[in-house]
Image: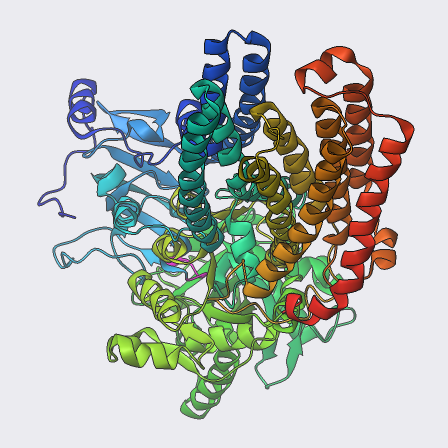
Amino acid sequence: MKVPSSTPALTGLTDQEAQARLKAEGTNELPRHDRRTPLRIVLEVLREPMLALLLGAGFIYLLLGDLKEALILLAFGAMSVVITVIQETRTERVLEALRDLTSPRALVIRAGERRRIAGRDVVRGDLIVLAEGDRVPADALLLDAQDLEIDESLLTGESVPVRKRAVDETTADDPHAGGDDRPFVYSGSLVVRGAGIAEVIATGPHSEIGKIGQSLQGLDAEPPRLQRQTAALVRLCALGGAAVSVLAVLLYGTLRGGWLDALLAGIAIGMSMLPEEFPVVLTVFMAMGAWRISKARVLTRRAASIETLGSATVLCTDKTGTLTENRMTVAELRTSDGAALRSADTTYGGTAAAFRDIAVHGVLASAAEPFDPMEKAFHALAREMPDARDRLPDSSWRLVRGYGLRPDLLAMTQVWQRPDAAGLVVASKGAPEAIALLCRLSEPELIALRRTVDTMAASGLRVLGVAGAVHSDGPLPHAQTGFAFRFLGLVGLADPLRHSVPAAIADCRSAGIRVIMITGDYPATAQAIARAAGLDMSGVLTGDDLRKIDDAALAEAVKTVNVFARIVPEQKLRIVQALKANGEIVAMTGDGVNDAPSLKAADIGVAMGGRGTDVAREASSIVLLDDDFGSVVTAVRLGRRIYDNLRKAMGFIFAVHVPIAGMALMPLVLGLPIFFSPVHIAFLEMVIDPVCSLVFEAETDERDVMSRPPRAPDAPLFSWPLIGWSVLQGATAFGVIALIYIAALWRGLPEDEARALGFFSLVLTIVSLVLVNRSFSASLVSAFRRRNVTLVWILLVIALVLASIMLWPAAASLFRFGPLHGDDLLVTVAAAAAVLLGLEALKPIWRARLSR
């Protein structure tokens, strides 16, 4: 950032100059990256193998002249495309709306006139006018400043506003956020007091916010672990299925003739062996999870991160605006004689006169309608004190004069005329040492004052002094030092903890999640907030400490240290990377631009949507729309529930594909009539998918969902016990169905009737596998007591569809089914019951392994 060498006349740019710079340098906004359009989402879905197989089968049916079967297969494929596009585009629209809400407007001077323009139209060289409540639209150099204070917490993480002064010849060319008495203001920061005029020196990607946004492009967001595991498994199964399918096509075409029929048989076998439901179910589980958690005002930018949050082992959180409310309140009062009054000890009813005088004079030394958070705290304190409320200024009081803060005297004084008194009331507040100077305290009094201030600061309080005086009629002094001030006492202000935080941190602890606070604030303040929040305290590591140690030492330190103070953005990133190097699954919460790199580098980035920045939101996976830290715990609970239910669904998918693949291959091996065509497989996929996506997703929490530790970071979703249990289930079902089909053919049943008997037995057996997999830990009776309305509706739909296929001749012809009689239906029900009861008898043997 380059500092202008001279101060321009306050006429600003002309419209022509502004337009030329806007065209040459671009608009004052961050570039939008990685926005997923509906077309891009469709193209991603079209790359799925199962959709390719469906389209291939549909094309072959078109060659065979069977338009009806071709359209059915294409309709099955289109359904999953539509569902995915609707869910993903909805999330993108919400994010765009959030982004637009934070675009500030700016008051600029152009051609000597003040005009209000969109923040995106501000250009380098513009003169911007700043006033209380304004959001700074771009990085700028102050040419004029009048008692100006700016909240830069979005950049620095510090909750206390910083003083600003106009540029002069002593200004160093070292612009950075934070620190008092500097002439630079930054895009996204908030003016809380005073006014000023500044020349824009950087916009858009060249601003401090923009530089952090640009640095994010070099960081790759962590791909969800389940997504990686699922993709690897599907690739493995696809390769195996492709090999078997090619072999089947060659065998069928060579031994039986009819290469188009052979190709259809090969596609059916490939569809039966490809567990395409894995990525589909994963997507739907995350989409449904995103919908459920949106009810708690949590937006999921990358839906798969909900599950990852459920496996988090470490939660790194910012302090300002995340654990705290980012507003000042009075926490403690100290009188001149050392008496203390804490906000937690009383409701201020019947307070002593000395405390009342501190509260009243604090208001008198503040703006009548304050914007500064500390002055708001003074007003709130006085309103809570009944005795002080009666002594506050009203419309009959007249403000005679105000003395602003100066770099050499950090105090401000206001002089008031009361209607019922001849003299003037004088009130001052400011830094304790400045107030001590105004009150001309003796050396022993100064020593006692410093000791008290140190004690209060050690509790994490921002300490201000308050003084009062009475001025008789006559000219007012030129400076504050001309009044005969009386020291009234000290006020300790704090950024209060959010009410939901202690309970949320306790829940994290019971769930085995370690909470680490990373803040740009001072160590004493960080420790005070950490104690109030209930964090495990094991020392504090500061930014200066981090500069002195290498990455290996930091990786060792983060194993025990839970509080980091005076941390700058690049150090937050180092901490997250050190935790990940230790094998932790890291979630990071934050709201400021300074949090964005660490949000993106973490396994799960959780941004605040209310007061957070665009940069933080776009770098994150999850956005808390109401900025409630307690919502993180809701997301963790939902993540663990998703993982539990996902394992149940995956176990079911493994199990159900064994009999499907077996019944596709067995006729080829034994020379029997072909059991499946692509239509049968597509129908089964439409049964399996909603069962997995809706029934298992709707299962309620397990009892120990928030009392067990996170699973090991390297724990696979598809553990060997789960695979073994699934294969056992599938083999049992396949044995029963194969026996029924072979017996039916052996007894002389026509091919279409034997196929119908075997297919109906398979569908009912799939229902049995659903019931078996509803819970790994509970028995069948206990599982039935768990409410799942979705299961009831799915079973009713399956029964209705089976009845339609059996009774509607056109449907029976499409599936090549013959009629079934009463005794045939009893066989199918008996087969399903035998599988259900047999597997329930075997479940206790596997229960201990599956619950790990």
Q: If the image is split into quadrants, where does the C terminus sit?
A: bottom right
Instruction: Depth check: give the residue in front, 401 or 633.
Output: 633
Instruction: Depth check: give the residue in front, 802 or 117.
Output: 802
Residues rendered magenta in the picture: 158-162
At x 60% / y 66%, what residue is drawn?
330
Q: Where is residue 27 in the image (x, y as percent from the top left)?
A: 26, 29
Secondary structure predominantly adopted by residues drawn in magenta: loop
Residue 449: within the magenta? no
At x 59% / y 29%, what residue is drawn?
674
> Which quadrant of the view contains residue 137?
top left
Instruction: Depth check: give the residue in front, 139 or 572.
Output: 572
Q: Residue 187: tell me if it is visible.
A: yes
Residue, far bottom = 444
Q: Position of residue 364 (x, y in %)?
A: 56, 58
At x 80% / y 35%, what residue is drawn?
795
Residue 161: within the magenta? yes
> Which quadrant of the view contains residue 16?
top left
Q: Position of residue 315 (x, y in %)?
A: 50, 65
